[in-house]
Amino acid sequence: MTLMTPLRHKKEEYGSTILALTHSFFQTVIFVTMTSIYRLLGFRKEEVTLHHAEVFLVSTTLLLSSLIALSQIVLWLGWVVVVLGNLRIIQIISLNLMTLMFDFTPTGDPSIAVKRARWHLVAIGFSFIDAVLSFAFMYQFFDQRYQILNNHFPNFFHYVYYSVITITTTGYGDVFPVVLLGKFIAMYEASVGLFFLVFLVSGAVGRLQKHV
């Protein structure tokens, strides 16, 4: 009963069980991947500033890039990168949808709306880089083991190329998945790419509205 109380309150607030469940899921993801880290570092939610959020974005990108580089040497580390990369992708979707649907703010100060709109666009940029790198590594990691693509590349840059043309739904046709796992990852990335388009447009519109 205790666990159901917050959910019941959210249902009453939003008037929908689906919205209440969605909010609870996204909130849980954000807590596990972001809020808990702030707490470990000694920050409470109300103490978090946009500077802290920016440091979190840059640190996440640097950490992901470092792990990808290290996994080229330490092969077993690849599984860790796959897990963390997918966790980052789920976090990206959760943060942006919480911002769009429930007016979520990454800081403890809800009053700085103009700065938050600007930060949202910056966050989308870093999130896009992280998503591209995460999917590129998944293509490389699984292609080396299961040959999921029609072409097999000698270095990571080519997988970044395929990741970019997939997430932007460009699809030149020179590289494509040939097995079920590869097709699933490609569909997964293309879907995330559509989310990014929505996030970018909403962020730009929100920025314009705050400016006006």
Image (spheres, rainbow, N blue to C red):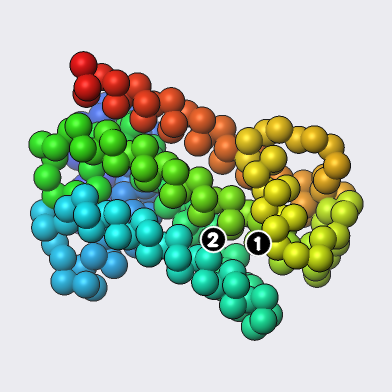
Q: Residue 98: x percent and y percent?
A: 33, 39
The residues tagged by marks 1 and 2 sit, at their Cα atoms, a distance apart of 9 Å
Residue 85's tag is 2
**Closer to the observer: label 1 or label 2?**
1
Residue 137's tag is 1
Q: Tell me if 62 is positioned left or right of 189 in this view.
A: left
Give the crowd class for mark 1: few <14, some 14-19, many >=20 residues within 10 Å: many
Q: Would residue 45 be visible to someone looking at this image?
A: no
Q: Nearer the viewer, residue 172 or 179?
A: 172
Instruction: Give the residue type at disc 1.
Output: Phe
Q: Tell me if 51 is positioned left or right of 25 in this view.
A: left
Residue at (23, 73) in percent of width and height:
40
Q: Quadrant of the N terminus?
A: bottom left
Q: Are marks 1 and 2 in contact (CB under 8 Å)?
A: yes
Q: Would residue 78 be visible to someone looking at this image?
A: yes
Instruction: Give the residue type at disc 2.
Output: Gly
Q: Tell me if 87 is positioned left or right of 47 in this view.
A: right
Q: Is 183 above or below relative to 65?
A: above
Element at label 2: helix
Q: Quadrant of the C terminus?
A: top left
Q: Residue 149: x percent and y percent?
A: 84, 53
Give the crowd class for mark 2: few <14, some 14-19, many >=20 residues within 10 Å: many
Name which quarter of the figure residue 189 lies in: top right
Q: Tell me if 200 is positioned left or right of 180 in this view.
A: left
Residue at (27, 34) in percent of width and height:
117
